[in-house]
Each structure stands twice: as C-alpha cells, then as structure tokens.
C-alpha cells in the first residue's frame, strides 16, 4: 500500500515496476467517491503492492502503468469497464471475471458471491446474504466487516451491497480478490484439455465486454428528422394527443377491415384474425407473417393485413415513443449491450439495436465528415462448421467465395437445395426440402455431419456441451419433468437440435467477437469507432478520409481473428466478409 499523504502518481513514477511483469494480471477497482485501487503483481525483481488514489488521478495512473507494464487489467464485471468508459479512459486488454465465469460455467448468473463460491468449491445454495432471512437463506452472523472473505470462505455479503461504504483500503482488497479469482479461472481454463482455445477465448470475450461498455456510451448515429419521416409514412404524423393517436389506430384498422365482412374483429387477437381470414375464404393453421406471405394469389385482405402489421410494429415498438426514449439530443441511439446472451454466447443489445426493422435503416446516417465501414461475414456458420469439425472436404468447399457452389456440385443438386441441406443439418431439420440432399451430405462430408450428430445425441441425453472456444452450453433436463412419453421424446429432440446448432452458432459468435475486438483496437488510430455489432455484421463510424483504409483493415483483421480463434487449426478454411464504405446503413448490399 502506498504511504498515506504520498502522491500516488509520484509513487508510480518512482516505482520499480519491473519489466519482467509485463502482460501480467493487475487488479483494478473503482468507486466514484473513494477513488481507485490498483493491485500490482509480484515479479522476479519486485514484490506485489497496492496503489490507491483519488478518481481525478485515475486516467494518468492507468496510462503510466499501461505504458510500464502493458498489463491485463482485471475487474469483477462490466461495471468497472463502464466507469472507465464514462471517464474517457481507453484500455486494450482486460480480464472480466464475470464474463469469464459465464464462459466456464454456462448460463448468465455471475455475481461476485456466486463466482467466488464456484471457484473455491463452496456450495452456491449456502451463499450468505445481508438481506431478508427465510428458511432458504442462511443468516449472516459474526465475522469482521473489514474482511471481504468470511471464516466459512464465502464473500462477506455487506461488501456486495449497493450501499457499501468504500474506502481506498477496501478497494485494494476488492481488486486483490478479483486477481485471485482470475488466477483460479486461468487454472480452470487450462484444465480444459479438450478445448485448448479456452484461455484465448476468455481474453477476447473480456475485451468484447469492454467493447459493449463503449457501445453503450458511443451510440448509433441516427438522423431524427429522417427517422420521423419514415415513421410518419407508416402511421402518420406525430400525434398531438392520446385521442389523435387512437384515431390513427382506428384508421389503420379500417384499412384492413374494409376488405372483410361487416362485423367486429380485433386485429390484435390471433384467433379473431383467423376468423376474419376464414370469412373471405382464406384457411391457415396460424397467422404468422411468413405463412401469409407464402400464399399464392393472396386476397386483398391478406395484403392489407401484412401492411397493417408492419405499421403496427412501428406504432408499438419503433415509433415516436421509441425515438424519444432512446435517441439522444446528440443524434445517437443508445441501448444496453452485453457480450453474452447466456446461452451460446451471442452479443445482445436493447433499444431495438438488434431487431431494428430494415425500413428504419435509411435513418442511420453517418455524421458530417464521416462514413460507415460496414462488414458482414459471409456464410459464417457453415465455414465455422468446417473448421471446428475438422472436415477437410468441407474445408475445401469453404475455400471458395461461395462455398455452396462446390457443395451443390458434390451433391448433384442446385445451389438453393444445397444451401437448405447445409443449414438444415446445422439446425436439425431432417425433413422437407433438402432432406434427400442431407443424406448426400452425410456421405460427402462425414466428419462434419458426425460432429453435428454427436452434439445432437449429447443434447438429447441432457449432457452439457462445450463450444470450440470452451463455453459451456447447458442442457437442462428439468423442463422435461412430468411429460408423457411423447412429450419427453419431443423435448429430447428439441434439445438435440439446440445442441447441434449451439456448437456452431456459439463458435461463430466467438470468432465474430474476436474479430470485433481486433477491429476496435486497429481502427482506433484512424478515428474509427465500432457503433454496431449485429449478429455477423460490424458497423464502424470513421472519418471519411480514412474510410478506404479502415475497409482494408477490416479484411486484414478478419484473417488475424481467424488465425487467433482457430489457433492454427482452421484446416485451411477461408473466412470472407462483404465490406463497403457507405453513408447510410441502408446503402449496404442486403
């Protein structure tokens, strides 16, 4: 601990941090009132130490330590990353304890008390709490509140409370515990002998969580006037009162109901919509949009109903209220981002950032003097399948710009059928269009198909799986309790389909995030900032004069990401991306 009264920055400048400690784990804890604490590791030439200081010195302290040690900064969760981003501090490498624990144990829950208990072999059901006591919650008794770890090994619950009073000393202890947790996680990851890429995945997943904190602050550029014009085309001008909004709603309904018989039909009630369709001779098992769109020579009522649904979605989800809530006065649309969906590990976002209708994309416009560099990974899941399964024949097909072309030739079917067969194999659809070609896949690409079949069988049996990068995918059997034989078989089949897809989708998500965090670092010197990560698509906001350079950079970063992700074992699989420099998101090729 730095001596009280000594300037912490002077202690850093004068400290012999030792170059042999470069790249090591350095703990970091931040509180807006108590300041910060940095826990430096012991090296061959120095002993471990803790540096504390006021929040105003945080940026300079981290910059000096980053230059001296190039450490991997360790913190408990995205809250610390968010505090850094809020302070305008940019770090490159980190270790997010919660994110890594989700990778190791699966699921979403990764609060410090649970993570600590799991890493130390303690019963999670016995985690103490400082809240309400009942039959299922152990009471908190005894113990020294200045000790973050109780005599029974669990974390002291008061340290986890929102109203905990932090001090520099306490921050130092908390940062040291984060380093201890990270060290235990590294041991656990290295023990996954069948998943040697797990430590690499943990590092990139942590950086992806840091990117998520930046995405929360950065926001997606959106032109309010353009957005309101698009909304008005669907539902009319912004209503000036609740009554006017209700009149607009009634008029939208009338545009549909005029095509049917006189009567009362609620368009927001699926059963009544089926009755309305039946009244004009349209019989459908359900009223899903894709089913209505597939009707041959549709009735005018069907056409009007599909248009109504698009307008209704705008009115209820992506309308004026949506803009008012999420679009800032600076013209940036902001939501909450997470690097993991709790299942196979895909990035998620709120505020409509991950499900914005295509018709709203013309309103996503780069700011004056800037452009977007948009990159979309091509045929990513079948290419990932070729890599993770080790199927050399499928890898040869993935060497082509369009890997479905050689697959179709191999199977003796047209390209569309080959694509349906490959996607069907990954999603567990073994009947319908492409089923015959699917049998051809099993003989032409037996290694890849066996990889999927094994995942399917494991899922049906309720055995947990791990993605190529080491993420645990849980197969929950509890939902099957109480089902009859038919229900049990149906549930098992669903788990099998989920298992085969989760291994491919999860590995693809790991590759995508590794690509994203590399782009984040490499594009920064050009003023480029990632503003959207949408499934397999990146949108980078960059000064116009650097648009071409960043476009080339994204392709180079993809090759680097593929090499890191595969660890040199990609079997020659080629990963491609459609990259374009555009002004509006809608200018991108669909």
Image (cartoon, rainbow, N blue to C red):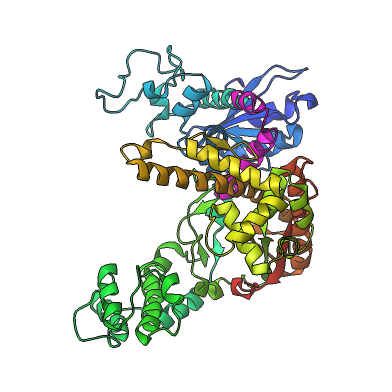
Q: At 56% across and 32% down in the image, what residue appears?
A: 104
> Is 94 situated left or right of 320 in this image?
right
- Along the viewing direction, whichever of 536 and 474 lies nearer the viewer: 474
> Is 455 situated left or right of 128 in this image?
right
Q: Split into 4 quadrants, where in the image is the N terminus? A: top right
Residue 191 part of the magenta-drawn span:
yes
Query: Could you say which quadrant of the image residue 26 lies in?
Result: top right
> Is 352 situated left or right of 589 in this image?
left
Query: Could you say which quadrant of the image residue 7 lies in?
Result: top right
- Along the viewing direction, whichever of 188 and 279 lies nearer the viewer: 279
The main secondary structure of the magenta stretch is: helix
Q: Split into 4 quadrants, where in the image is the C terminus? A: bottom right
Image x and y of residue 390, in percent: 73, 43
Q: At 59% across and 44% down in the image, what residue appears?
A: 453
Q: At 38% across and 13% down in the image, what residue appears?
A: 143
Let me know if residue 456 appears in the view. yes
Let me know if residue 531 appears in the view. no
Q: What residue occupies the far left of the structure in this picture? A: 263
Above or below: residue 429 compared with residue 30: below
Q: Which residues are magenta?
A: 184-213
Image x and y of residue 526, in percent: 74, 59
Residue 149 part of the magenta-drawn span:
no
Above or below: residue 161 compared with residue 352: above
């Amino acid at each position: 601990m730095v001596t009280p009264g000594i300037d912490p920055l002077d202690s850093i400048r004068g400290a012999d941090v030792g170059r042999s400690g470069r790249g090591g784990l350095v703990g970091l804890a931040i509180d807006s009132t108590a300041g910060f604490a940095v826990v430096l590791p012991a090296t061959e030439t120095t002993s471990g130490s803790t540096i504390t200081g006021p929040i105003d010195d945080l940026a300079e302290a981290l910059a000096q330590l980053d230059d001296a040690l190039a450490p991997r900064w360790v913190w408990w969760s995205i809250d610390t990353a968010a505090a850094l981003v809020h302070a305008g501090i940019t770090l490159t490498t980190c270790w997010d304890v919660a994110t890594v624990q989700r990778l190791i144990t699966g699921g979403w829950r990764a609060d410090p008390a649970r993570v600590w208990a799991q890493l130390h072999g303690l019963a999670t059901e016995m985690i103490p709490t400082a809240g309400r006591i009942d039959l299922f919650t152990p009471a908190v008794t005894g113990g020294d509140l200045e000790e973050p770890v109780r005599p029974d090994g669990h974390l002291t619950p008061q340290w986890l409370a929102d109203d905990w009073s932090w001090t520099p000393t306490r921050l130092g202890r908390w940062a040291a515990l984060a380093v201890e947790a990270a060290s235990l996680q590294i041991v656990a990851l290295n023990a996954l002998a069948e998943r040697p890429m797990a430590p690499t995945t943990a590092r990139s997943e942590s950086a992806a969580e840091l990117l998520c904190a930046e995405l929360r602050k950065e926001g997606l550029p959106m032109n309010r006037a353009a957005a309101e014009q698009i909304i008005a085309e669907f539902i009319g001008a912004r209503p000036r009162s609740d009554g006017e909004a209700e009149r607009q709603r009634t008029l939208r309904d009338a545009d549909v109901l005029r095509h049917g018989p006189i009567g009362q039909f609620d368009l927001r009630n699926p059963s009544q919509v089926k009755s309305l369709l039946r009244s004009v001779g349209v019989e459908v098992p359900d009223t899903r949009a894709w089913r209505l769109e597939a009707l041959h020579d549709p009735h005018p009522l069907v056409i009007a109903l599909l248009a109504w649904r698009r307008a209704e979605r705008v009115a209820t989800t992506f309308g004026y209220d949506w803009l008012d809530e999420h679009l800032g006065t600076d013209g940036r649309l902001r939501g909450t981002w997470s690097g993991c969906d709790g299942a196979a590990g895909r990035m998620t976002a709120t505020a409509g950032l991950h499900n914005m209708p295509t018709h709203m994309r013309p309103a996503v416009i780069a700011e004056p003097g800037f452009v977007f560099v948009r990159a979309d990974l091509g045929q990513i899941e079948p290419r990932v399948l070729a890599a993770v399964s080790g199927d050399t024949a499928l890898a040869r097909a993935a060497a082509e710009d369009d890997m479905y072309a050689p697959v179709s030739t191999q199977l003796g079917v047209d390209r569309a059928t080959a694509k349906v067969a490959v996607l069907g194999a990954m999603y567990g659809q073994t009947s319908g269009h492409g089923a015959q070609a699917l049998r051809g896949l099993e003989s032409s690409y037996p290694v890849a198909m066996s990889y999927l079949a094994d995942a399917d069988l494991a899922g049906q049996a309720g055995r947990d799986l791990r993605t190529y990068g080491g993420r645990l995918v849980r197969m929950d059997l509890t939902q099957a309790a109480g089902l009859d034989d038919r229900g049990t078989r149906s549930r098992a089949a669903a788990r099998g389909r989920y298992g085969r897809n989760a291994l491919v989708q999860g590995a693809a998500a790991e590759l995508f995030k590794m690509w994203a965090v590399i782009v984040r670092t490499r594009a920064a010197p050009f003023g480029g900032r990632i503003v959207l990560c949408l499934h397999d698509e990146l949108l980078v906001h960059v000064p116009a004069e650097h648009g071409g350079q960043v476009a080339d950079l994204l392709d180079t970063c993809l090759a680097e990401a593929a090499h890191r992700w595969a660890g040199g074992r990609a079997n020659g699989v080629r990963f491609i991306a459609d990259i374009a420099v555009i002004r509006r998101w809608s200018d991108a090729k669909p």
